[in-house]
Image (cartoon, helix red, strand yellow):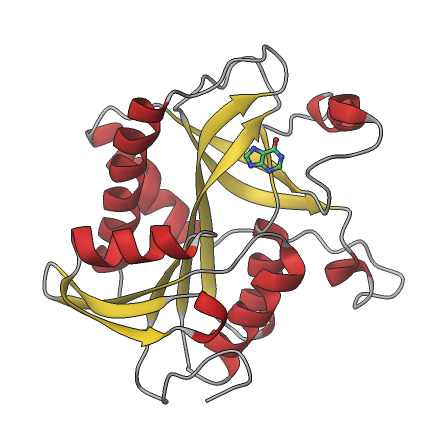
């Protein structure tokens, strides 16, 4: 048990899916898991464990942003022994080649967050994904003909930046594909604890074109993304 998690040691599987939204965690457990059981409800930041294709798997909501995410992820790694983390989320699009509904896998995550800069002294650490997980995910996406981009993400501390979307222009100019708010902390903590992590997002709103996903497409692309994430989890040693 921790101040933020009432689960006992052993309640989480080695692999944990990480949506931001607690109700999405519940939906993932109820829709995809065999024999789901709730393991955490502190602050309604729900966590569940069950199985997928016979392999144990968990899902834990992170809340929004790196400070919240870092609490749940740190404890999953440090207290509960998680080994593989897969964030399943949405991102804003920063490159016109990424269409609404497309998957974006964060190979690396730039950030403006003190969650990273406070820790690294003179260095600007470059948080990065686990290569084998990314390779498995891109193989599955290709097999299923899911449009999928692999590249840089930015994990922003502000959804509503004072400067507006132009704050991201410098990152678009350096090939960054999408903006979300959690990946950098997940990658950094996974590295710190010798674990592996990957972030996959559905592009939900393009900051370049203004295109937005509609409710129906959001639901079906979410299902495809979660199945892909679960198959990456189940297919790996
Ligand atoms: N900014 C940050 N996070 C997001 C966005 C965005 O525009 N869209 C989806 N997640």
Residue 148 location in percent, x, y?
A: 39, 28
Q: Viewer-proximal residue, 62 or 94?
A: 62
Q: Is residue 229 above or below residue 60?
A: above
| Extreme residue in the front direction | 43
Q: Is residue 88 visible?
A: yes
Picture quarter with the C terminus: bottom left
- What residue is drawn where x is 59% and y is 44%? 108
| Extreme residue in the right direction | 122
Quarter of the rendering containing residue 18 = bottom left
Residue 212 location in percent, x, y?
A: 48, 18
- Residue 95 placement, left or right of 59: right
Q: Viewer-proximal residue, 132 or 38?
A: 38
- Residue 219 placement, left or right of 101: left
Q: Viewer-proximal residue, 84 or 223?
A: 223
| Extreme residue in the top direction | 209
View quadrant of ligand 1: top right
Quarter of the rendering containing residue 191 = bottom right
Q: Is residue 106 above or below residue 97?
A: below
Residue 69 location in percent, x, y?
A: 57, 61
- Residue 201 placement, left or right of 49: right
Total residue callouts: 0
Picture quarter with the N terminus: bottom left
- What residue is drawn where x is 56% and y is 74%? 74
- What residue is drawn where x is 73% and y is 42%? 158
Q: Is residue 13 visible?
A: no
Residue 142 location in percent, x, y?
A: 27, 29
- What residue is drawn where x is 52% and y is 70%? 72
Q: Is residue 135 above or below residue 1?
A: above
């Amino acid at each position: 048990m921790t101040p933020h998690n009432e689960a006992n040691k052993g309640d989480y599987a080695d692999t944990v899916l990480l949506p931001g939204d607690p109700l999405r965690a519940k939906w993932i457990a109820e829709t995809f898991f065999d024999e789901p059981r709730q393991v955490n409800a502190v602050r309604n930041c729900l966590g569940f464990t069950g199985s997928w294709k016979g392999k144990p798997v968990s899902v834990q909501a992170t809340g929004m942003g790196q400070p919240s995410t870092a609490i749940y992820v740190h404890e999953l790694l440090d207290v509960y022994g998680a080994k593989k983390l897969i964030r399943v989320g949405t991102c804003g699009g920063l490159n016109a080649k990424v269409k609404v509904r497309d998957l974006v896998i964060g190979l690396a995550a730039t950030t403006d967050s003190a969650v990273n800069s406070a820790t690294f002294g003179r260095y600007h650490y470059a948080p990065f994904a686990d290569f084998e997980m990314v390779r498995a995910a891109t193989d599955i996406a290709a097999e299923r003909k899911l449009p999928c981009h692999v590249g840089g993400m930015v994990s922003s501390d502000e959804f509503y930046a004072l400067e507006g979307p132009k704050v991201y222009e410098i990152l678009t100019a350096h090939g960054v594909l999408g903006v979300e708010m959690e990946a950098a902390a997940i990658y950094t903590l996974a590295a710190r604890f010798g674990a592996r992590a990957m972030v996959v997002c559905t592009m939900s709103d393009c900051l370049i074109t203004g295109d937005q996903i509609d409710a129906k497409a959001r639901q079906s692309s979410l299902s495809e993304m979660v199945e892909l994430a679960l198959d990456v989890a189940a297919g790996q040693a």
